[in-house]
Image (spheres, rainbow, N blue to C red):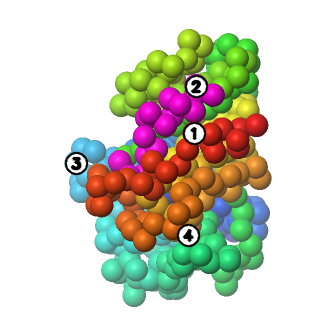
Amino acid sequence: MNRQVLIIQTAFTGDVILALPIAQRIRTNWPEAKIHFLVRKGNENLLEHHPAIDQIWIWDKNQHKIRNLLGLMSQLSQIPFDLAVNCQRFLSTGILMARLNAKQKRGFSENPLSFLYSAHFPHTRSTKGSDTLIHEVDRNLNLLRDIFPTTREAPKIFPTQEEVFRVQQLLPPGKWIVLAPASVWFTKQWPIEKWKALVGLFPEDWIPVVVGGPKDADLGDLLLTVSNKGVNLCGKLSLRESAALMSLAHRVVCNDSAPLHLASAVSAPVTGIFCSTVPEFGFFPLSPNAVVIQETSGLECRPCGLHGKKSCPQGHFRCALEIQPESVFQTLL
């Protein structure tokens, strides 16, 4: 009899990418399983054509959030799951887990309803300066630690040939340097003047290609005022097309944000710029060719928060301003 498995990760894009190794690990060990994956509306494109995912469930949080959650509960509770894994620590997904008909329910101890799970595990972080860093992928796979091997496994996204072809048609010949300058949080975003200075260092055959959401288009235009050959694709690509672009790039440069993990999921060479946050939080890149750039003066105020802030609490923003374009450029050579 084929097993039924549900994975829940309805947070943001980067979180979904870093939950993919759970599906990959289950597929490797239970090849016959039917693997369901629940995501928030907008992230479903990430999971399409993934060989480890059989059915995608979508929670629309933007309109009628509670009503839509209740509808999902009703549908999912009808499925006899052998295993349900919740990657989130919020009450809403804890309530959903409580309603499931599942033989095993697993998640993080920090979820308010984790006492109802079959097994729960702490969501631990490395300490600053640790020799061995714990990644979010490690934490997610730890939820299966007594079922499957716990060795780290990078997330994988599989762009189609059609997606790769479309991206190739949008760009001129040359070395494509993919730039993702935006971030939801001000203190996680390397200042735009620094990005412009970086592009100003590019050789003639390097093509700066800016990616991001529709709201980032103006930022992309501002960045490319220093280049007469750059391409602004903000809002013009799906998540999987962005991944396809990264797979073809000479290098990807981005903040500590979702594009970092998108690049890792296609093993693209990537430079991650960490301003107010630190790799010890567990969101460093997993690409084979990856470099982390951060300030080295040992600011006592850094990190100032897990997710970044709307402004620098100290008013100086040295964690970003001390990172020089020349240092980032050296990683592109």
Cα separation between marks 3 and 4: 37 Å
| Residue 160 visible, this angle | no
Instruction: Please report the bounds of the magenta region as a residue range.
Output: 185-201
Which residue was labeled with disc 1?
Answer: 325
Q: Is residue 33 left or right of residue 11?
A: right
Cα separation between marks 2 and 1: 9 Å
Q: Marks 2 and 3: which is nearer the front?
A: 2
Label 4 Cα crowd, 10 Å radius (few <14 / some 14-19 / many 20+): some
Magenta stretch contains residue 188: yes
Q: Who's the residue at 49% across and 51% down the image?
A: 322
Task: Evaluate if marks 2 and 1 touch, with contact meaning CB atoms under 8 Å apart.
Answer: yes
**Which type of secondary structure does the marked residue at label 1 adopt?**
helix
Label 2 Cα crowd, 10 Å radius (few <14 / some 14-19 / many 20+): few
> How far across and how far down the image is residue 72, in percent?
36, 56
Front-most of residues 140 and 277: 277
Which residue was labeled with disc 3?
Answer: 64
Q: Who's the residue at 68% across and 56% down the image?
A: 286
Cα separation between marks 4 and 1: 23 Å
Cα separation between marks 2 and 3: 46 Å
Which residue was labeled with disc 2?
Answer: 200
